[in-house]
Image (cartoon, coloured by chain):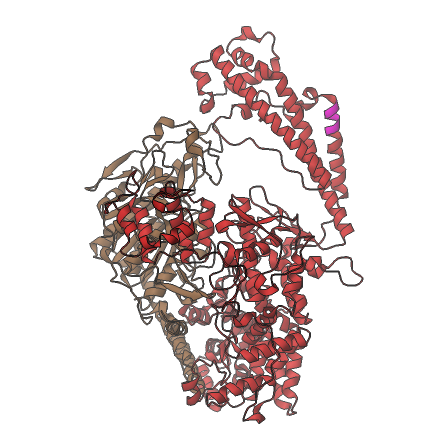
Amino acid sequence: MTRRELLSRYALGAGAWALDAAPLPHAKPRARSVIFLFMEGGPSQLDLLDAKPALRKYDGQPLPESMRAGLRFAFIQPGASVWASARHFQPRGQSGIEMSDWMPHLATQADRLSVIRSMVSDQVNHVPGQLLLQCGSPLPGRPSLGAWTLYGLGSEARDLPGFVVLFSGRAPQASGGIYTSGFLPGTYQGTPFRDSGDAVLHLSNPTGVGRADQRRKLDLIGDLNRQHQADTGDPETESRIQAYELAFRMQAAVPGLLDLSAEPAEVKARYGPGRFAQNCLMARRLVERGVRFVLVSHASWDDHADLNKNHALNCRLTDRPAAALLEDLHARGLLDSTLVVWGGEFGRTPLVQQEKPGRDEAKGRDHHPYAFSMWLAGGGIRPGQVIGRTDDFGLSVVEDKVEVHDLQATILHCLGLDHEKLTFRTQGRDFRLTDVGGVLLRKLLA
Amino acid sequence: MLTTSRALAFLLVMAPACAEEFFEKQVRPLFASRCAGCHGGKKPMAGLDFSTTEGLRQASGLFSEPSRLIAVLGYEDRVKMPPTGKLPAAELDTLRVWISRGAPLPPAPPQASESGPRRNHWAFQPVAKVEPPPVRRSAWVRSPIDAFILAKLESHRLSPAAPAGKLTLLRRVTYDLTGLPPSLAEIEAFTLDSSPEAYEKVVDRLLASPRYGERWGRHWLDVARYAESTGADEDRVYPFAWRYRDYVVEAFNRDLPYDQFVREQIAGDLLPPPAGEAIHTRGIVATGFLALGPKLLAEVDRTKMLYDVVDEQIDTMSRAFLGLSIACARCHDHKFDPITTRDYYSLASILVSTRQFQRLEGGAAQLLYVPLVDEEIAQKWRRHALREQHLKQESELFIQRENARFLMAHQARVADYMLATRDPERAASLDPSILKKWVAYLNSGKDSRPYLAEWYRDPSPGTAAAYQKRFTDQALSWQAGIERWASEVEEARKNEEEAPMRPRIPAGPDRFFPDVALAGAGPLGIPEKERPQRFAPEPMARYQAAQAELKALEKTRPPEPPLACGVREGKAVTQHVFIRGNPANPGEEVPKRLPAILAGERQAEIRAGSGRRELAEFMGSPANPLTARVMVNRIWQGHFGTGLVATASNFGSMGEKPSHPELLNYLAAELVRRGWSVKAMHRLMVLSNTYQMSSLATPAQQAVDPAGRHYSRFPRRRLAAEEVRDSLLAVSGTIDFSTEGSHDDVREAIPVFMQEKRLGQDPDKSRRRTLYVPLRRSNVPAFLTLFDFGDASTTGDGRGESTIAPQALYLMNSPFLTGRASELAKSLLPLTPKGRVERAYLLIAGRPPSTREIDAALGYVAAFPDVADLTGWTSLCRALFASNLFLYVM
């Protein structure tokens, strides 16, 4: 992209909110939108997607000395004992992807998704790990995946923000950093839908002001601005007038978007109860309306203690809705054009973290960035396969290591964007989401 | 596969993008592990040396596409390598990527001295004295600046725009210098003053206003990436960040010479105190510039963390003062500018020899707070606090040593006790009270303790003996740890440093020793009430004396002195180049010195201290051509929207070239000539005709100078986030102009070391200027972000001006804006309807309305049920606030 184009995008501004940012696929896109189910805190791959029966043999014992070299965890020592998962795994669907009994609903979608068991990150702590996964760098200040996507492709949603963020769960640690526009223009940042008050900040009219009043005020603002434009010849004024019109349309569109009463009962039932379920349904509705990127964040999987209890709860809250989302997207013919990504900033250790000796039910697992699992489905993904393999302890990757930048490069690729060409010049050099990394994960692609 | 350490991988992820890093991170390790075993060393096989860059360079024929190397490694050639088996596909992919990019290798090592075009880059040249150029239309030249601007315009056959209208100019200069709109009284006074000096008087009034420092201090706080918490993982509050903020505001208000401002922010703590004062309070506070950056406090590898902090400081400092990105040289010589890794680590050497933390170890590193009182008083406070801390550790030491003595006396009977819990016959020679505890411990029903499983399975003498052996081993090693700790405590006492905490037993599956020996309820643990009977009398007496002294000390503890978040001198460190940024891979030793391209190869040796003082002298010296250039450019940018160099923090060869190089030179020389007075620069700029032009472009200007880079007219701009909010408060008459101090009254009551507290967030609840709103790095208030505030994590070089729908929602609906509009409307009601419209326009747009505008406004309000009613007028004010009349400075 040339500097001139870039400046004009910046000035036009409303790009992320309407069709007017010239779409820029570098190649034929396979997916039009992304729904990222962000499992904040780090779900335990060993209890969900990466069965390690060999751990049973070592359960309760420390790792063999030879395996401990170089291990570094956030809290526990490498000498901690092995903790085998109590979950029951079995092959699912035609593809035979193994999943645990904590994901009975996702199991029905096994042939629609692909699991990566060989994800690696180099960040042991949450915030840097989340920033790496969502923004490509452990340091703050870089644009998020959603912002880059919007910057590259603009949005097709006429009345809605192009990048929406939905939250559920408890004790989230993620900050605005995971949906920031970083050094990109503010147009590209994610718009969080809030769960109390206005869903979008300042969406409602002030108290006592009706829609007709608001329209009249908007017309006055429009008149003032047009006069201003006539007086000054400032072309920016037109963008501002458009921004107001879009805001006004949003005021009308968002309540309709949020109103689920028209959804058939069986659809709602398929997603099940709870905030995450609502958010998954909302994600589908957003994508249907042309929204480019939906970040659905669920917190927290950070179970250093009481893992069995808390993970079971999180699975009850998320398994059915995630599966319903795939089913629903498929039923509406949207799955081919929507890329769905599921995963957290890292996984959890095969070694136990036990703060209360003697209380077995309080066992937990520490952060484990050296080998963890994610799954992807939909636009551009070849379904029904498992990528990568970890060693018998689940400690490290032995085949097809996938770094975070590789995943990001692949997500952009599905959208028709070349991660090496999608750059933004700031501070005297070109920046990109994948920094100096990123190898396309061809095996994953359809 | 890849053998790079995780630390290195982290560094590389952080470092700027370039082909060399891809090579170092992914390609070189692969050659090293897969090929160099045979193709390396003294006699590389087939004459191919894959172990060095030079060797690879000589083999580069293998890498040009179609690459023989790929064929060989892909087992598609007659030769198949490596002979032990084909490489994994991912590694082949890595090499394919590298080759597809032209197989770039790091450049050959630099020759003795940098030469050639890079050294000749304009920004490194001395600031030469420049005379303003001759122009045809000399009558237009009011200030030397105008000559430079006009010369360029004339060379493009352009003429400057007409002068701006009087009230347009008043509004422009008032916002530019104070970030606020002119008041009614100011508008009236200026309108009535028809003297030729009227405008100059306004400028002097504004420069003398305390509001000036708040506006221009905020510009600097962007550069200093100012925020009040550490961001990243812990996001701990910097409880005294506000002192630095107030220092910056004050520095601008008192027109502290810029060279002094620079020196104080790097080494203010080391400068001689002002006459009559014992310490340089202002200087210490100023080092907040270095101290207030983002920090990963809980990073497990503390060495790496320290060097990350230093890197962040080098980056901020070099871009802020020099307009150079020196931090690029952390892993390799700078790709575009003549900065070497030697230069980088020479600077790093200065900053690691600077004390950055109170304590680096522990769960999260502890921030450093520097006392702002006489050394004597500070010493007294610190000694008192240290004495308390040492006494606490020493008391603990008495206890642990007695514990150890007791354990040593009993360790040989562990097996006896265990067996006696099952066989009362064996109890004869044992202490009944201890045995009772063993019974409770072993029969507590807590059979899920995995380390006791063996005992429950087979409670035989053999098993008990094995447990006893484990116990004795651990007890000995624990006792040794206590003795090591004892000597560390002693050492700390001698050095007047904080004593380390008692060593912890590492968490592990075998809790037998800690549960038995160290838990108060353990069979060999000694709860506090048993101490008098179990401990020897002499240590017990010393323990009790220590406790009594501690209690007395707590009573006489001096009050906490005022503190600042700053840095101090640390232990001088001998620094090495870290090869590819990896602290575990030290290369040649580097002296503490300044970048050679700026300070020359021959520099006086820095023998004592960290070298921060010498660095400060250099940064604030006219001999360094960048400092003055970069600052005048920032001032220019503050007035004209874009700098003469558009990349205000990058004057290197990848930055933009100056649009008016002679003018930049002239201004830089003027700054130095006028004693580095920033206010003198403001006067020079805003009194020029260039500044006083209209912002309206003629079609000719639009065609020849579409972006305004020739300054054919004044560039209009949108209000910054702070200006939007501050204006709402000012216009509604509800602004609170109190300055200085912590925004957080509660803080004073809370001890400094309780840092877990989060900063308050809601700027809507405050009436103070936005500058004083708490700024938490990981969660910048949504309102600020909405209007392009930026992220407060990296040094800023100017704000964006986006136009987005969420801004429209804010301007239409936010309760804060609605509230201010209603307050304004209330203040209008006593006037006639026409008078109300006139006043609203004066306050919001800085000018009276036209007849047409009055009619439109009255028509708008008339549609509401009652003209006397607040609703219609509030709505009108909201519409005016939401319009470009308000949002733009023309």
Q: On screen, B563 above or below A250?
A: above
Q: Residue B33 colored magenta?
A: no
Q: Quadrant of residue A179?
A: bottom left
Residue B865, percent from left and from top: 44, 79
Q: Residue at x 48, y 88 (%)?
A: B155
Q: Nearer the viewer, residue B660 or A239?
A: B660
Name the main secondary structure of what is drawn in magenta.
Answer: helix
Q: Which residue of the protein is positioned furthest toward the right in this rendering?
A: B276
Note whether residue A298 is visible.
Answer: no
Q: Which residue of the protein is positioned furthest toward the left in this rendering?
A: A94
The answer to whether residue B163 is left or right of residue B17 is right
Q: Magenta region: which residues?
A: B538-543
Q: Nearer the viewer, residue A28 or B135?
A: B135
Residue B482, percent from left and from top: 63, 29
Note whether residue A44 is visible.
Answer: yes
Tell me the red chain. Answer: B
Tally the marks: 0
Q: Residue at x 52, y 23 (%)?
A: B512
Q: Quadrant of residue A200?
A: bottom left
Residue A269, percent from left and from top: 26, 49
Residue A324, percent from left and from top: 26, 49
Tell me the brown chain. Answer: A
The answer to whether residue B28 is left or right of residue B361 is left
Q: Quadrant of residue A155?
A: bottom left
Q: Which residue of the protein is positioned furthest toward the top in this rendering?
A: B425
Q: Nearer the viewer, residue A151 or B420?
A: A151
Quadrant where the N terminus of chain A is found in the figure: bottom left
